[in-house]
Amino acid sequence: MNNKDVILGSSAFVQKIALGTVQFGMKYGISNKLGQTKNSEVKKILECAYRNGISMLDTAPSYGDSETVIGNYLDKKSWNVVTKTPNFKGNTVNSNHVNKLLNSFILARKQFNQERLYGLLVHNCDELFLPGGEKIFHAMSQLKKNGIVEKIGVSIYNSEQINSVLDNYPIDLIQLPINILDQRLINDGSLVKLKQNGVEIHARSAFLQGLLLMETHSVPLWFDPIKKKLKSFHDEANNRNISALQLALGFVNSISEIDKVIVGVNTLRHLQEIVDATSIYVNPSKFASLSVNDSMFINPSNWKV
């Protein structure tokens, strides 16, 4: 390393990693050329993750058959599993939705062969603010009270959702997007506010669905307006003699308020690269100039590629 703002981290950085599993159930990611991860590879990935101190899995009913695939390969080891509520349809929440939630959770516990799951998140937190939305959180609270889930919370996208949830619901856990381009929740104080409220923070999109790991010449035309930012990101990595993966992961992993960084992989090699990259610590404040605020480029649901 030739730059004093890059230092070697510790094994604790590996333990901040949570394994995202959407690729185990469906094709996912803008840079994914391999499709859904093969079951035989999933087994190797899970074994390697646990061996390296990664014991938390993040999944959801909407991730194709991810929960089923994971369940085939979890053994008696002490995995911490975070799953989410199923997708609800309609403009109100009623007892049918609550039953769907409970049945989905019961199935997940059975598939994972776990007496208690670590976390249950409302996948679309806006559903909490539909008429009857409080029924969702009440049902989740009962699961926690019964001792079959340790922490309950929400998955969000922006600070407005964070503020609404904190004002109305006593959450333990939150999942949010953050990466070296998407620094909104750092800059507006949301991370600090969440920690002041005792909320555990899990960060997703560290690689922005793989966009940050793509060579700039192969990035889709959709991203032309931020191509200079992407080039600057790669230049920053090169200047520090580290890879794009190391800088992207190091940025999020080095944010003190973040408790877990969720990363998805398609192959055992990808996982090994991530484990190796956790040795890198950078000062996040050094990269403020790379921040992008336009949701058309930092929110994958808006992408037209």
Image (cartoon, rainbow, N blue to C red):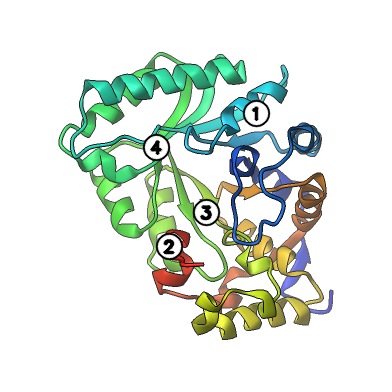
Binning the other alpha carbons within 10 Å of mark 4 as few (below 14), some (14 to 19) or many (20 upward) gives: many
Where does the image place residue 297, in percent across and percent down from the top left?
A: 47, 71
Position of residue 125 measured from the top left corner of the image (x, y, whole percent): 33, 43
Could you say which quadrant of the image residue 79 lies in? top right
Q: Name the residue beneath numbered marker 4.
A: 153
Q: Residue at x 78, y 37 (%)?
A: 41
Task: Tell me which amino acid carries mark 4.
Answer: Gly
Which residue corresponds to mark 3? Answer: 257
Q: Residue at x 77, y 51 (%)?
A: 270
For marks 2 and 1, give the one nearer the viewer.
Answer: 1
Q: Residues within 10 Å of mark 3 (few under 14, many from 20)?
A: some
Residue at horizontal 55 percent and vertical 56 percent from the top: 205
Q: Secondary structure at mark 4?
A: strand
Q: Earlier in the sequence, mark 4 or mark 1?
A: 1
For label 1, the SS is helix
Numbered tag placed on residue 185 in the rendering: 2
**Residue at the image point whose x is 80% and y is 54% from the top:** 273
Q: Count the marks: how many?
A: 4
Image disc number at residue 70: 1
Q: Nearer the viewer, residue 17 or 29?
A: 29
Q: Is residue 6 above or below residue 162?
A: below
Q: Secondary structure at mark 2?
A: helix
Evaluate if marks 2 and 1 touch, with contact meaning CB atoms under 8 Å apart.
no
Under mark 2, the amino acid is Leu
Give me the disc on residue 277.
none
Q: Nearer the viewer, mark 3 or mark 4?
A: 4
Dot 3 or dot 1, earlier in sequence: 1
Packing grade of label 1 (10 A; few <14, some 14-19, many >=20) is: many
Front position among marks 4 and 1: 1
